[in-house]
Amino acid sequence: MKRIAIIILTLTVFFGVNAQQQQRRGKFDVEKFKKERIDFLVKEIGLTDQESKAFIPLCDELLTKKFEINREARRKNRELRQKGANATNVDYEMYNELQVDCKIKEAELDKEYYKKMKTILSAEKIHKYQMAEKQFVKKIVNQSNK
Amino acid sequence: MSGLDEMNKKNPFNVPENYFEKFNAEIMSRLPDENNTEKRNVTPLWKKILPISAVAAAFVGVLVTVGFFNNKTIQKDKGFAESESSANETMMATTSSASEADDFYLFLQDEARNTSYYETFAE
């Protein structure tokens, strides 16, 4: 009986630890992400205080708008997956068009904000910003997946 | 000297009377009764299985609790080329509506995946 109890306890501990590693991380902290992102961008781009004051709100705005644009597409994608085999051709067509429209809107948004950014930063720093933004997002998602 | 000579002729050890004649019978009488050996203590089958099934049940219970059998909640570290976010989206869709934070994270995943695709093809 004692041996059985030890076996059960060992298995419970083992799989409990494994579950913590495997289970999805808790609620994503958006505020923490935004703060770390700003710190990262300022450091990577090499922004001065003056540039930060003008530039950071702009790139925050851009990120928020991109998030909103894709929201509908993500919602439709979830609906599509929920439907599974019951999804009709019309559903797929709607989603595909939504995806394409999102890409166009994103590109237009990028262009609009690029023109605004040009008034604040040099072309080199804008390029650094674009690289840093992508690297940071990738880094955060990588960390969250571990 | 004569006493010693006498001692050497006599065997100082003796055996009880009829010892060897009675030996077989006495040993046999000490053996357990053949009738009794037929009645063994048989452990019921359910008692034999119980400890093993208890371990198995606990094991399965732990696996179910941690969602081991639910592939949608297991995150595999396969990089962004895998469509893991789609599985996550399905999972989150099943829990009423996706929270703002979860939706934002999905957005970041899509962005990260696009970056990876671009980098892969650019290289």
Image: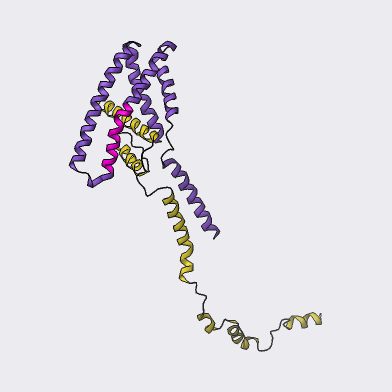
Residue at x-position 26% and y-position 41%: A80
Which chain is tinted yellow? B
Specify the quadrant of the image occupied by residue B93: top left
Residue at x-position 74% and y-position 80%: B8
Q: Is residue A72 magenta?
A: yes
Q: Colour of chain A?
A: purple
Q: x, y (%) of residue A62?
A: 33, 22
Left or right of B18, for residue B1: right
- Judging depth in this view, the residue of A41 and A117 nearest the camera is A117
Specify the quadrant of the image occupied by residue A137: top left
On the question of residue A8 being in view, the answer is yes
Residue at x-position 53% and y-position 56%: A5
Q: x, y (%) of residue A2?
A: 55, 58
Q: Is residue B120 magenta?
A: no
- Judging depth in this view, the residue of A7 and A108 nearest the camera is A108
Question: Does residue B81 sit above or below B10 in this rendering?
Answer: above
Question: Does residue A23 sit above or below B21 in this rendering?
Answer: above
| Highlighted range, magenta | A66-81
Q: x, y (%) of residue B90?
A: 32, 42
Left or right of A29, for residue B122: left
- Judging depth in this view, the residue of A15 and A36 nearest the camera is A36
Quadrant housing the C terminus of chain A: top left
Question: Does residue A79 sit above or below A128 in this rendering?
Answer: below
On the question of residue B113 being in view, the answer is no
Quadrant housing the N terminus of chain A: bottom right
Could you tell me what secondary structure mostly forms the magenta stretch?
helix
Q: x, y (%) of residue B43?
A: 50, 72
Residue at x-position 38% and y-position 37%: B99
